[in-house]
Image (spheres, grey):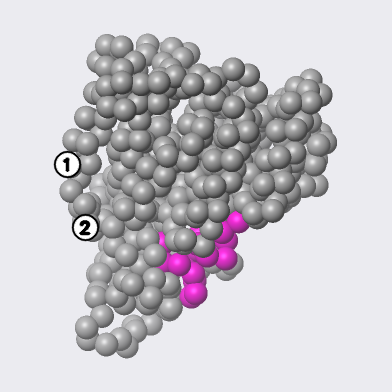
Amino acid sequence: MAKALLIENGVVITMDADRRILEKGHVLIENGRISTVSDMALDVPADVERIDASDMAVMPGLIDTHAHAGHTLTKGLGDGSDQWMDITGRIYAQATDTEFWAAEAALSALERIKCGTTTAALLFGGGPDIMRTETPAAARAHLAAVLDMGVREVLAVGPNRPGRHVYRTYDQDTFIEREVLPGEQLAACKELAEEWTNRDDRIRIALSLPVFDMAELQSETVYNLLCQLRSLAREGKLLLIQDGHRDGSIAANAAFDLFDDRSLLAHCIDLTNDDMAALKRTGAKVAHNPSALMSVSGRCPAPELAEQGITVSLGTDAAAPDRPFDMFRNMFQAHRYHARHFRDDRVMPPEQLLEMATIEGARALSMESEIGSLEPGKRADIILVNMRQPHLWPPANPLQRLARFANGADVDTTIVGGRVLMRARKLVHHDEDAILDRAERAFGTMVKRAELAR
């Protein structure tokens, strides 16, 4: 258990129900949880570890509600997004082993630590047809690396879209090919969910399911798959995540009783009135990804949804082909994206953007009682942002400076569950170069297997 820690003298942005900001605040952490948040000096034992947060913003760790496992090691491949997607699908199916998934997970967690993202929801793979869940092995390798790095994660595992899918399984330089069946993917997902239930508070398993249109939902195969995933999610009280809703797909899926308040729907562009009504009726939440490719081809009506009381969070859709895990960048992009649409700079003010990246993100993951704000009793997921920098100066209006001017590289300290993972931009428990070197080796092996030019 992490020792007691006192963060003192910082601008504490609580994101609590009153949205309190303490100009010279102090946060005491005990047994991995926040015990006190105060603007008064705290009387603590002499041996309590202290962090002087002068000239820093002290705020909840950022929460990324939509990203992908695997993508961190596919950056720079292909000449455009279409080619990148084709290459990535081939890589995941034909060129990865457990070391790829472990090395990529460590690199992904490293990037998140360094940009202040303490919790992320990741789909295990990319798209509906390249989910490496034919056995639990790849996900286990990923989760072991994430656990070692110390971040908090929701990993969504699920089946492919129905069809014929052939994957390669490697033993060093040799491989076997086998067709992947939905039934064995469902069994692997169930096994992973049972393994991680109450195992460690930093790891949760969610279920993912392809997005279906109304025509597909008439298929008996699709309907049976939907029913099995829905039952597994509800019996295990697991989050259900779908990636890529648009143009009536929410209403179509809701008609089959797929959604409830533990459903998280990503992208949600070009929604119909029936889609928005289904979100309101079912309590499903939205992961808005302003930097994603889908936000180029259509628009998520995030401000309008939030106005209706629907939970809207922020996701990066990271980490490739063209976006990092930097949630500060996404806050700014979300503002410009919708301000341009409405031609009104008042749309999505700084406080709302910070809410989407913290407490609304926690609510989207059904974790608002545990994380997302700095309040006594909550888990101590906290970041310190160095505000004494030219692009964040002068010291006025901290919310505006964070949402409009900050970037991930401004994060000085990252704390998860009271454990300091990064201090003064340096990892506390790991060798950053070793993580990068390991990722490079895994990348090289993957490139050789996929017969790609580096």
Crowd class of label 1 (few under 14; some 14 to 19; many from 20; radius 10 Å): few
Residue 437 or residue 78, whichever sits in front: 437
Q: Which residue is mark 2?
A: 428
Q: State the image quarter where residue 437 is shown.
A: top left
> With respect to residue 18, does 247 lie above or below?
above
User: In percent of the image, x 40 and y 30: which residue is there?
Assistant: 71
Q: Please, what is the three-letter code of the amino acid marked with disc 2?
A: Val
Q: Residue 447: in sight, yes or no?
A: no
Q: Name the mark on residue 2.
A: none
Where does the image place residue 223, in percent across and percent down from the top left?
77, 31
User: In percent of the image, x 63 and y 33: which residue is there?
Assistant: 183
Q: Which residue is mark 1?
A: 433
Q: Which residues are magenta?
A: 366-381
Q: State the image quarter where residue 382 is shown.
A: bottom left
Q: Secondary structure at mark 2?
A: loop
Crowd class of label 2 (few under 14; some 14 to 19; many from 20; radius 10 Å): some
> With respect to residue 206, does 244 lie above or below?
above
Quadrant location, the N terminus: bottom left
User: In percent of the image, x 22 and y 86: which residue is there?
Assistant: 46
Q: Please, what is the three-letter code of the amino acid marked with disc 1?
A: Asp
Query: Magenta includes 374?
Result: yes
Q: Secondary structure at mark 1?
A: helix
